[in-house]
Each structure stands twice: as C-alpha cells, then as structure tokens.
Amino acid sequence: MGQYTENELAKDLENQDYKFGFVTDVETETIPVGLNEDIIRLISSKKEEPAWLLDYRLNAYKTWLTMSEPDWAHVRYKKPEFQKITYYAAPKQTKKYESWDDVDPEMKETMAKLGISLEEQKRLTGVAVDFVMDSVSVATSFKSKLKELGIIFCSFSEAVQEYPELVREHMGTIIPHTDNFYAALNAAVFTDGSFCYIPKGVRCPMELSTYFRINAGGTGQFERTLVVADEGAYVSYLEGCTAPQRDENQLHAAVVELKALKDAEIKYSTVQNWYPGDKNGVGGVFNFVTKRGLCETNAKISWTQVETGSAVTWKYPSCILKGDHSVGEFYSVAVTNNHQQADTGTKMIHLGKHTKSTIISKGISAGDSQNSYRGLVQIHKNAHKSRNFSQCDSLLMTDHCGAHTFPYIECKNPSAQIEHEATTSKIGEDQLFYCKQRGISEEKAISLIVNGYCKEVLNQLPMEFAVEAQKLLAISLEGSVG
Amino acid sequence: MEEVLTQTKFDILRTGLRPTALNISDALKEKANNVLNYSDFPTRKNEAWKYTNVNGLNKLVFDGKNIPISEPFTIANRSKKIHITNGQVSEGQSAIPGVKTSWDVLPEFFTDDPFDALNALYCTSAIQVEFDDSENETIELIFENTANSAIFPRLFIQCNKGAKGTVILNFQGAEQNASFINVSTYVNVGENANLSIHKIQKNGADTFDLQREYVDQAANSTFTMNTFPLSGRLTRNDLKINVNGNNCETFMNGAYTLKGKSHCDNHTTVDHKVAHCYSKELYKGVIDDRATNVFNGKVFVRKDAQKINAFQSNANILLSDTGTVNSKPELEIYADDVKCSHGSTTGQLDDEAVFYLRSRGLSEKAAKELLVKAFLGEVLEEVENEEVKSYVEAQIEKHFSA
Amino acid sequence: MIEIKNLHANIEGKEILKGLTLTVNAGEVHAIMGPNGAGKSTLASILAGREEYEITEGEVTFEGADLLDLSTEERAHLGLFLAFQYPVEIPGVSNVNFLRTAINETREAKGEDPISAKEFMAMVREKSKIVELDSKLASRSVNEGFSGGEKKRNEIFQMAMLNPKLAVLDETDSGLDIDALRIVANGVNTLKSADNASIVITHYQRLLDYIVPDFVHVLHDGKIVKTGNKDLALELEEKGYDWIKEETQVG
C-alpha cells in the first residue's frame, strides 16, 4: 500500500485546474528576442564560457539553419516562430548562491509550491535537488555530502567552469548536434541544465533530482543534462517539470545524455507536468526533447517516465546497447486529455552481444487527445543472443480521442528473440461497475483502475515520485470519461 | 508548384515497355500519365517503402527468352481454369460463365499509386471474375510465365450480394525467370457475400512481383485473403481493405519461405470505417540465407466505428546470420469501444525443441524442418481450401529439401 | 428492508422481468430459484443498478429510499451488496487498497471519518479468517489470477468487510467444489444477524443445504410464481422445474 491516502487524493481532485500555473514574481534578466549568431555570442559571454564551447554553439547553429522541422510524428501544431522566442531568461541575480540561505525567498516559495521543499527533503529523504528556473540553475542542495564521495552534481554552467575537461569529453558524444532539428537548436542556445558525474565504483547514496520550471513569458527553455556514471557506479536521477499557465505556446527543447560505462547503472526518472494548455487547447508547452543513453559492457540504463503535461510531446528516451551484456529499459506512462498530443516511445539499439531490452508503455487517452507510441527495436548483426520484450497498452476513455501504436522492429541476427505485444481497449465497464457496487464513485474508480493499469511503470519510480505521479494521473484524468 | 522531374526511374523503366493494346479511356490514360509524370521510384524516405528498394527493376531485360516451367503447376482439380501466358490470356480457351476477358474499354478503376498507373498504361490482360450465386465456385487464374517479360494483369473480382466464391491466383515461373510482374486487383464483396482469394507467388529467382489488392467490403460480408509468397527476387504485396459495412468479417493470412537473396514485403491495411466488425490477421514466415522479410500491418479504426475486434500477428523465424526481418505492426485507433491487439515475434527455432527431437532420433535437419513446418502450420490451418493447403504444404516441403 | 413491487424490466427491447414482487425483512434469508433464463441474474443486476436494463414499471424501496432513483455507489453506501456471479479482475489494484477505498467512500458518504490503517488491517485479518482466505490474497490484485473458488471466497470476504444490510448472492455456488461451497456458506452464515438480510440466487438446491433459507421463491418467466419454505427447494431438486411451468400455464 502506498503512503498516499485516498483522502489526499480526494483533496487533490478538488483542485480541478493545473496546480502549478502560478507565476513567480522575481525579477528576470532577459536578452533581446530572436536568434542569430550575436545572440549566441551574448548567451555564451553572459555565461563566461570558454571559446571551445562558443565554437560548439556556433557550429550547431550553422547546422540547425540547414535543417527543417521533423514532421513524421503523429502530432499537429503550429510551428514555433523561432525569432519570437527569448533564448535567455534568468532570475536577476548579481552573485552566485553560496548556500541555500542565499536563495531569494520568492524562489524558495516557488519551490515550496512545487512540492520541492528542499529543507524537508534534505532531512527526510536525502534527495539532492538542482533547481532550474527559466534556463538557469538556481540551487543545488546537498553538495558537500556528495563531494566527499567524489560525486559531482551541479548546474551545467558551473560544470563548464569547474570541470571543463569532463564536460568537453562527454558533451555531445551521445547526441551530436547534428542529430535532429531540436537537438541542434538546443546545442546552439542551451542556457543551463544539470551535470552529474559519479566516479568509479561509487554508489550514489541518495536520489539526485532536478526540477525544471519555465517562469518568464515568451521564453523557451533549452536545458542540457549530462549524466556520466563511471565504471561500476550507480545513480538514480529524478527530473520534474512545471510551467505557469500562459495562453502562448512555450517551447521546451531539452537534451539529456547519459553515459553508463562498464558495469555502471543509471536510473533516470521523469515526471513531466508542463502546462498542457487549457480545455480548448489554447496555450501549453511544446515539449520536444531528445534523450539518449549509451551503455558500455554490462552497464544498465533504465528510463522511467510519467508524462501528463505539455500540449505537444515528442520524446523518445533511447538506449544504445553498445557493450556486451548491457541492459536497456523503458517504462512509460503517457496520459493525454483535452487537446493534448503525445508521440512518445523509445529506441533500443542492440549492438553488443547478449544485450537485453524491455519496453513497457502504457498510454491513456482522454478528451480529444491523440496519444501515440512510437518505438524502434533494432538488432544489429553482431548482437548475438540479444533479447527484447515490448508491451504497449493503450486505454481509451472517450470516443473522440485516439490511441496509436507504431512499433518498428528490425532484426539482423538469427539468435535474437524479439517479442512485441500491444493491446488497445476501452476502460472496462465491468471493472467500473464492480467498483461502484462496492461504493466507489466513478471518478475514484477510474483513478484506481488507471493506477492499477500503470502499476508496472509506477513501481519503477522512487517512492516520493510514485506518489506524486499517482496524484498527477488522477488530476490529469479529471472528468475524462465521455 | 511541383516541377516535372527531368528523367525519372519510371521514365527509364517505361522505355522498355510496350503500351497496352487494350482500349483504355483518355480520362484514365491522362490520370495515369499524370501520376507517373510526377513520380519517381519510392525511396527509403517514403515510409511505405522504407525497407524495400525497387531500383533493380531497371536492370531487368525483357528479352522474351523462353524458359519453360518443368513441373506441373495447376493447384485445384475442381476449379475452372483460365490460363494467362506471359501476361496474355491464352487463346482458344472455352468461355467460363462469370469470367470476362475481352473488353470494349477497360473499367475506370484507378488509385494514385504510380505502380497502378503503370499497370493501367501497360496492361497486358484485364480479367473480370464475377460470382452471382451461393454455389462457391472456384476459379483459378494460372499465370504461367515462361519468358523474361513485363506482365501487367488488371483484375476485377466481384462477389455479388449473397454470393460465395473462391479465386485462386496462381503465379508460376521457372526458377531462372527474370520478369517484372505488376498486378492490380480490384475486389468488391457485396452484402452478405463470402469471397476467398488464395494467392500463390512462385516466381523465378530474379523476378520482381509488385501487387496491389484494393478491396471493398459491404455489410455482413466475409472476405479472406491468403497470400503465399514462395519465391522470387522481390515480392511486394499491398493489400488494402476498406470495411464499409457493419458486421463484416475479414481474414488475412500469409506464409512465406524466403531464401537466397529474396526480398519479400507484405503491407496490409484494414480500415474499419463502421461498427461491429471483426478482423484477424496472421502472417508467419521463415527467412534463410541473405533474404529479407518486411511486414507492415496497419489496423485503422475510424471514429464511431465502435465494437471492433481486430487482431494482428506477425511471427518470424530467422535461420541465417545474414537474413533480415523488419516488422512494423501498427494500430491507429479513433474509437473507444474496441478490442484491438497486435503481436510480433522474431527469433530462431527453440534449441530445446531441436534437441528433444534429435534425442528421439531425428537428424538436426529433419528436426528443424519439422519445427518450421509446425510453425507455418498455424497459418495453413486457416486455409479452408484443401487443394490450396496441400499444394502450399508440398511447396514448403520442397523448399526445405532443395 | 427491501420491497420490490410489480417490477418490469427490459434489455435491448426484450422484457425480462414481468411484474416481480418481493418483500424481504431484516433477519431473513430468501432463496430465489428458477430455471435458466427466468430472470434471476437480471434481478440481481437491476438491484445493484446496472445501466443496460430499462425499468418500465414498478418500484423498489430499500431502507426507506427509492432504490431505482439512486446511483450504483449510493445503493452500496446504503448497505446493498452484490456478490457477483463472475467477479471482475482489476489488474494492479490490490485487494486491500480496493477495499479501503470502498470502505472510506462509504464512510465519507455517511459523514464518518476514514478508517485508520491499524483498524483496517485488524479488520482484514479478522474477516479473512471467516472465509479461510489466505492473507496473501489480500495483497494481490483484485481477483487477478484467483481460482474460481478463491474469487467467490473473496466476494464473501468483501461482504464481511463492508458489512452490508442486504446481500444479494448471485449464483455464488456456481463452479464451487464441495469444500469451497462449505467455506462460502459458512461465511455467509457467520455474517447473518437480526439486522441484515440476504437474497440467495441459485439454480441448485445444493447451496441451501448450507445456507438455510426462510423463504424459497420460484422465479419463472419474469415473475415469482411460487413461494414456500426450504422444503420447496427439495421438491424442486427432486422434480425439476417442469411441473412449475405447467402449473403456471394452467393457472
């Protein structure tokens, strides 16, 4: 039984609207709107970056100019006007935070509203949190304790200053700036993000966590996360996202790169709750994210995501199983309601021998939304005795939403075993009736059944996140049965 | 504004083809020309042709060299037969009621597919088969390809209201044959009708065979399509079924045995436009040597098409290190009260089972053959026509003994 | 407790109940027997509030309220319990989570505080003994992977937890071997009190050896055509239903 009581759920259900739709009143420093080489130079100089990084950005920008927006996903949206976006917005701040006490009280309040009570978490759960608001990392807690173990966990900008060799060595090696339109854009204009390095043989004793928030209007968020687990290391990393309610579509184009060296393990969990737009599909975040991990020999990367927010989501956290005996996992719950559109899934690229991948995807469509699973399982010639198991289920809540499954299975090795199963069905009338006969209201019965349906995925999340995810599911499906 | 491409691969292909001797309307000719003028061979970027490359078509030489087929190849004894030799309806055949082979002008059916356009413009024979009563007659079209030639049959199969019928499309070519077979088949299944089509593609090792079936089903009808690509350099089947009426049943089965450099691509689409229908699809095959199999099955359930049960399954056994399997089962669903599922598996034969059989005295080869036959047997179980079933069984047997 | 008057009901235009009248008082056990298709399960479904049925005539009063006017969950809150003929599986939802939600929703409807975790767990331990239900089943998903007998025992376990005023047991004996039948019946008997009542719907007399009814009604062609005591069940067992059918036709 979860710690989360039904009563708490009921309270949350009362809150019909997007609960993270507030705007924090902190002064923001922005740069002129639009995108050109000068803007990129400006971003780079504001961040006091070394020359190689500026070159990297400019190079990416040049590549981006030659690329066109991808159009193969099962989503429709008005293309962002890239010259109308502000590419840098930072809470105005003259000095860097030395300690938690230095953080702006307004900002602390924002975090509290988001449920990231850092003090509390420090004490109770030992989660170290990095908080990125409008592209700039504002606080990283618990740093000293991590330092003792040689773990680096800081904002990306700080890493660029403090550990330039590490950043330079790994950045862009898994997702090159040429990878796709939005990855190129990110490489050109990214403003901050998180960096994490776990040294050889170290098991990170606490969950590392980053919260991303878009606060200022008219801005895009382009953060970059790089997690490197050295040989035999282990880390569990959490990522949460929110944004205020705005009528405009805000762009979020992030890049996340994971590198699990020999025998290392990275668990990466996301609860994505960007503002989804209102009931009529006005506003909301465009969430175009590139996430990929590389596994060396015997390494393991596990992606878990609960996607409830964003107007349009386009996201395929992937694993390159390069080393023999490496393991990739993808557990996903994607809920769409009203006019949301999600096209999400994974790519499992099996290169090494005896590599193994598991894909569990649960899609829930409600309202007028469109929810697609898109996934690739690719077994290369030398990936002897590799295995994949995929299970993709879709649940439909109304007769005007859509649920789609587009798996691509490519096999070039005879000793591989690939199994893919998918089902699509309506939420069970019999189950609803059974619950109601036992005195459970329809709304609560749906929440119960949906949570049960997603159990396999929710079980992968660390406890605090699982509780939050359950609440989010309930809120997202408010009044969803048509 | 689209610009006319300078010289497309279609243009090159067309230089070696002889325009149809049949009478086609100016309207159809114009439509077909229009499509071809703005098309080129599909490439990887074209989602429907992601895994299949047809460039080899332009390497074929239609020299008419005669290569007789050595073995007998009619499938059904009980069927009425029409022989089509190298694309032409053989002369001197006695008329069969319901079958039409001569035309004042070709029917206007047309889709925007460039290969259908090609088929219309270079049509070598047009045959209509019409079923009018519930007797379940079997009509077998025997396409006997004894020369390296370009063959463009255009078929119209009509199963009228309440009628029952079976059609066998029997494509045969000698092993050395290098032809281009391009078939468009338009199928109409009337209300309460029941139509089965069995298609056997036993082509020469260098033959390209591109086929399309466009099927429309009216209410309360049953349609079965069994496809057996047994040999050929490249085989591509596009089966598109529109289920337009309520209470329909649709069955699609396929079994393939690929070896050498064979490339086989089965694309199927079943489009459930209305409520209360059932569809079931089962495609299974074994891939050996450097062969490649592509499967793409799509199930559409349109808005308001409630109470649809749709099942789709694709299973592959990869026998060699150099073979490739690409499988893409898709569901696209816009109604909520549905039960749809698909599954896809790719793997090798169960080592344990092979070992078990060997421990009972079977040779490794015999053990594998037995298991493969059992694997494909599931598809053959679905074939009602005993003669087709035993023919395909025999071909599978031969495939492994060769 | 419950008063059903002249109840008529259709499903998809077909009339199933054709004027059924039945009164059940607190402390009573009523058995409803009848041949297949008589309308037994329809009655259970209508009492619980399945929406596929259309009530064309008649009324049902339960605990002073107009039952037909209430939603399924409101009926449950008032103390109506249906033991399903085919209990439904709910993957991923544990039995205890399910039951705690059910109990708390009912409490909330009555304006009571939610049950404490401690009290709840104590209750689970106590009540699961009644039907000899393995405590492991309590933490498993609702009915998922349960055997037929376990499902039926789970129904009675839920009944014990929810402590209803009126329990309607729909063919609870179907598919049970003699041991499971004994356990289920034992459970039902243990829960019997002067304040509650039950309606036992069954096709066979077998169950009534264990749950002794105060009244036995024969349902035929949508109506109760004969009422008697437990001896009537024995008579039906011996002679079948044909004589009832004949009698009804003559009458």
Image (tube, coloured by chain):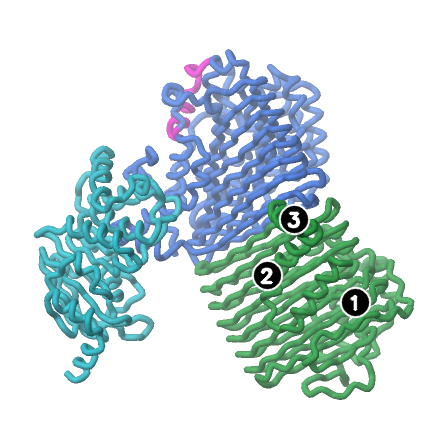
Chain colours: A blue, B green, C cyan
Chain name for mark 1? B
Residue sitting nearer the eye, A131 or B281: B281
Residue sitting nearer the eye, B402 or C33: B402
Q: Is mark 1 on a helix, strand or loop?
A: strand
In the rendered image, which residue does mark 3 sit on? B358
> Which residue is found at the position 79% from the left and 73% from the top?
B72
| Mark 1 touches mark 3? (CB < 8 Å) | no
Q: Is residue C68 above or below residue A355?
A: below
- Residue C106 in sight from this viewpoint: yes
Q: Residue B181 shows which numbered tag?
A: 1
From mark 1 to mark 3, how far is it between C-alphas? 42 Å
- Tell me the kind of residue under disc 3: Arg
Check if residue B23 falls in the magenta segment. Answer: no
Residue A292 relative to residue B109: left or right: left
From mark 1 to mark 2, how far is it between C-alphas? 29 Å
From the top left corner, tell me how far across and down residue B27 is, in percent: 75, 76
Q: Is mark 3 on a helix, strand or loop?
A: helix
Q: Residue B25 shows which numbered tag?
A: none
- Residue C57 in sight from this viewpoint: no
Q: Which of marks 1 and 3 is in front?
A: 3
